[in-house]
Image (cartoon, rainbow, N blue to C red):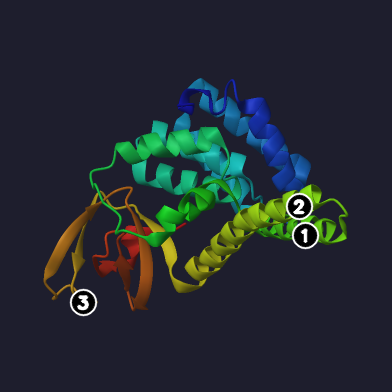
Amino acid sequence: MRILRAAGGAAAGAAALLTLGLLALSASAPAPAGSLRSRFEAGNDAYERGDFREAAGIYREIGKAGARSAALHYNLGNALFKDGKLGEAILEYERAARLSPGDDDVRENLAYLRSLTVDEITPAASPLSALGITFLLALTTPGQEAALMLGAWLAAGAAFGAGLAARSEGFRRTAFYAAGALLVPALLAGAALGTESWIAGSAEQAIVLAAEAEVLSGAGSENPTLFTVHEGLKVRIRGRAPGWLQVSLENGLSGWLPDGSVAPI
């Protein structure tokens, strides 16, 4: 759990990560990278002083200027949590996790904040869990999955080619076994990449920001309530109507919420 160190002891590492995001800004960004870095440091200073609301405001200004960084979302999440805004903090940690899925601090803080939410949702059984794909999705980005898939396929091909060219029966057998073993991570990475693409194309993920919201059977307040969700819960957006969003939970339940009660990740 690293919330207390987000903009203090871990500030140097966070600033380094932010710099990478600032370097990725386009030439048309509203503010130069140096100015954004100084604002980031100002946000860290406000956090250290205990002015978490001011810190959150500064981090948000940086985001509006076009910066994109896991460190920025991470520190914003810390400041929001300290300011008592659980749902918004989870939203920012989720955004940080998308940019840096292997970051232990982000993962630990997100797990802790999820433990503070009201709703306990048991995900529907998925064959992906048995295959280990969900674990891979949690730790890697689509780019890393693509690199792993390509690297494993190339290595498998090289091992297979070496086996074909080998004169020694023992070496040939070992090379073929190695090629077969390398196909496993290649297939897993390919499946993870395909799953990422399917998730991105099928439904947008969002976080409930309202302290409590009734999920209705249709897009309109006259419809009956199906169930209630609370701040910090992750949902998927399945459809839209004027002023309303159709959402589904990990356990398969679905219904309609006012669009202002959730925010997309």
Residue placed under numbered mark 3 in the picture: 218
Label 3's element? loop
Pointer 2 or 1: first along the chain: 1
Mark 2 crowd level (few <14, some 14–19, many ≥20, 10 Å Cα): many
**Residue 163 sits above or below residue 113 on the image:** below
Spatial separation of the CA atoms under disc 2 and disc 1: 6 Å
**Residue 259 sits above or below residue 59 on the image:** below
| Residue at the bottom extreme, as displayed | 241
The amino acid at mark 1 is Phe
Which label was assigned to residue 175?
Answer: 2
Tags 2 and 1 touching, CB below 8 Å: yes
The amino acid at mark 2 is Ala
Q: Position of residue 131 (x, y in %)?
A: 46, 55
252 or 17, which lies in front?
A: 252
Q: Of tags 3 and 2, which is closer to the observer?
A: 2
| Residue at the front extreme, as displayed | 169
Q: Quadrant of the N terminus?
A: top left
The residue depicted at 79 percent of the width and 54 percent of the height is: 172
Pointer 3 or 1: first along the chain: 1
The amino acid at mark 3 is Gly
The residue depicted at 76 percent of the width and 45 percent of the height is: 33
Q: Is residue 54 among the parts visible in the rendering?
A: yes
